[in-house]
Structure formats: structure tokens, C-alpha cells
Image (tube, rainbow, N blue to C red):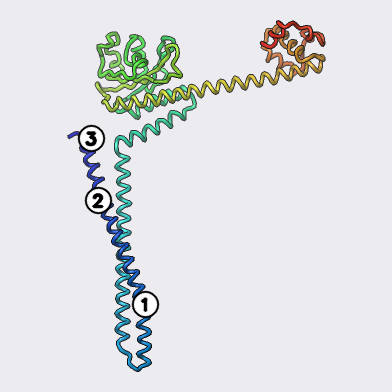
Amino acid sequence: MTSESVEDERQWAAEKRDFVADRRDELAAERDAVADVRDALADARQVLLDERERQLDARAVELGSPGDSVVSAASRLADRASRSQARRDREEVAASRDAAAVDRDEAAERRLAATPTTKLAAAFAEVAEHLYAADSFDEVLSRIARAAVSTVAGCQMASVTLREGGTFQTAATTASAASAVDQAQYEAHQGPCLDAVDEAIVYARSFPDTRWPALASRPADFGAESAASYRLAAPRLWTDGAGGSLNTYGIEPDAFSEEAQNIGLVLAVHAGLAAGAAHERRDLEDLAEGLNQALVSRDVIGQAKGILMERLKLTPEDAFDALRRASQRLNEKLRSVAVTVAQTGEFDCRDALRPGSGASRSPARAVERDGA
């Protein structure tokens, strides 16, 4: 019987014990509830009897025959005290059962948290949060490599390979030895990290491997006795032959079990999505910056146009053309010329047309102006 089977058997036995104990406590609680109701009815009946006895005692006194009222009262008090003690005993037992139930619930939670599936789910939740919190694409790649070492059993060092324009490079690594193993594969033009750019998973039990004769045992020279590489599936990133792979290296031959490889595969999917999200976030930030610069340029050009219109009595079209001619003559961007005019008011009036000349501008010139 494997260790996993033994653990499953132990888990099942513990859950069975807890179930039996919970059911036993439920039945005991039901019995206590019935007893409490019975005692409540007895107390109510006793109140009525006490009142009846009091009336009889009073009548006996009137008739001059005290009877056994003292004995009856003592007996009733004893019965009431007995029921009160029984009720307290039941409450103590119920409190003890509640405490035992709480202990069983906590033990069940600990057993659940200790199971491999739960630990793995918790680990991936933390990994996902860690990856998506990265500020940049490069930081995401670094976190991917570190997550592989902490999550994949047997992984002692990890790296991320990127392919762009037919060239491979290591974009993130947890150890210089991992970078050296990557470089050996780049130089040999073959190896698991290269193949994994196009394949979901590539596993090398040991080196040398007949699939990569040119690579031979060079990874082992840097301490990598086995490797498992995974494709970073991020279609929004990889275009025109680009791609990436997550590389995990073990210091022993066949260091990665089937379970470890599956975990690495899931991690690679998380990593690819996180990398894509970070790349899109960077593109959006660049777009926002570009739009902001465009708005600033438009604003400063408008200010410069207003100055020229007021000073030289130009139409808006003529003022813009004057800025454009100054930009061409000075070989500067139009925005730069506009900034100078807006900040200093300096402008070479030779670049301006005579007022009203814009009306004679040809359609071709108008198209050129609008395009500018």
C-alpha cells in the first residue's frame, strides 16, 4: 500500500469517527431537550400543587387539624431541588459535548488543510495573487521563475526563456546556473527549453538525451541533471514567431514525478495569463501616455495659435500654417515651436501669411494642413 493510500485510509477513518461522534451528540442533545421540556412541565405542575396544598393547609388550620403539611412541603422542595440538579448536570454535559464538537471541527479543518489537493489550491491562489500584483512584465517573469521553485516538487532552479525574431534569451532566472543551462541550449540550438516554446511540456529525465545530441551532457555540467520545460501560453503576446517557456531544473536525474509535472503545467498556464495581463497593462499605459501627450500638444498648439491670431491678426488657419512653416524652417517639431511661442511669445513674422490670405488657399493645401 502506498503512502498516499495509507493517508487516504487514515483520513477516511477520522471522518467516520467524527461523523459517529456528531450523531451521538445530536441524539444526546435531543434527549436533553425532551428532559428539559419534561422538567418544565413538572415545575409548572408543582406550582399548581403547591398552591393547592397551601389552600388545603389554610383550610386545615381553620378546622383545627394541621395534618401533614410540613412533611408534604419538605417533599416538594426535595423534588424541586432534584430536578434543578438534574438540569444543571445536563447543561454541563451539553457544554462538554459542544466543546468536543468544536475540537472535532477544528481537527477536520486541519486535516483538510493538510491534504495535498487543498495545499495545492492554496498555493496556486497565492501564486496567482502574487503574479497579478506585479508592476511590470519583467517583474511577472521573475515571479514566475520563483513560483516554480516554491511550487513544483523537485525544482531547484528555474528560468523563463523568450523567443523573438528567431533569437532566444533568458528573461528571468532564479540562479546563474539556470541561465548557464539555458545558454548551453541556445548555443546547441536544441534542448527542452527551446522545444517547449512550441510544445505544452518537454521532460528530460536526464542528460545526455538522444533527442538533443548536440547538447549532450552540458546541462549536467552546470548542475541540471533533469529538466521539465513548459510552454507559456499567451497568444496575445506571441506573434510573428515569438514565444516563451518556463524551465524547471532538478539536481537529480528524473527529479520530477508525474504529479510535479502536472503542477508545473498548471503553473505555466497561470504564468502565461499573468504575463499576458501585464503586457496588456503596459500597452494600455503606453497608449494612455500617448493620448496624454497628444492632448498636451493640442493644448499648447492652441495657445500658440491664439497668440499669433491676436498679435498678427491672423485667422486660425493662417496661424496654424505659420507655425507649420516655422517648424519646417527650423527643422523642429510643431509642438516645440508652439511651446516656444506660448512661453516666450517669440516668433519670426516672416513665417506668417498676410491676413486674409487663407481664403485663397487651394483644396490641396487644405488637405495638407488637415493631415498635418
Query: Which residue bears the numbered disc 2?
Result: 20
Pointer 3 residue: 4
For the residues labelled 1 and 3, the Cα–Cα distance comes to 66 Å
Secondary structure under badge 3?
A: helix
Residue nearest the observer in this picture, 156 or 325: 325
Quarter holding the C terminus is top right
Residue position marked by numbered label 1 in the rendering = 48
Amino acid at dot 1: Leu
Residue 142: x percent and y percent? 42, 24
Q: Position of residue 261 (x, y in %)?
A: 30, 24
The three-letter code of the residue at mark 2 reads Val
Observer able to see residue 51: yes
- Inspect the image, locate mark 3, and give the three-letter code of the amino acid beneath it: Glu
| N-term mark: 1 or 3 | 3
Eye-nearest disc, 1 or 2:
1
Q: Tell me what residue is drawn at x 63 percent, y 20 percent.
A: 293
Q: Mark 2 and mark 3: span between their CA atoms?
A: 25 Å
Q: Quadrant of residue 318?
A: top right
Q: Reading the chain from its start, which is encountered first: label 2 or label 3?
A: 3
Dot 3, crowdedness within 10 Å: few (<14), some or many (≥20)? Answer: few
Of 353 and 221, which appears nearest the observer? 353
Q: Classify mark 1: helix, strand or loop.
A: helix
Q: In the displayed image of the protein, which residue is found farthest to the bottom?
A: 64
- Judge by depth and name the residue closer to the eye, 183 or 25: 25
Secondary structure beneath dot 2 equals helix
| Residue pictured at 62% horizontal, 22% vertical | 292
Count neighbours of disc 1 (C-alpha within 10 A) and say few if under 14, some if 14 to 19, many if 20 or more: few
Which residue sits at x=75%, y=10%? Answer: 322
Q: How many marks?
A: 3
Q: Are marks 1 and 2 in contact (CB under 8 Å)?
A: no
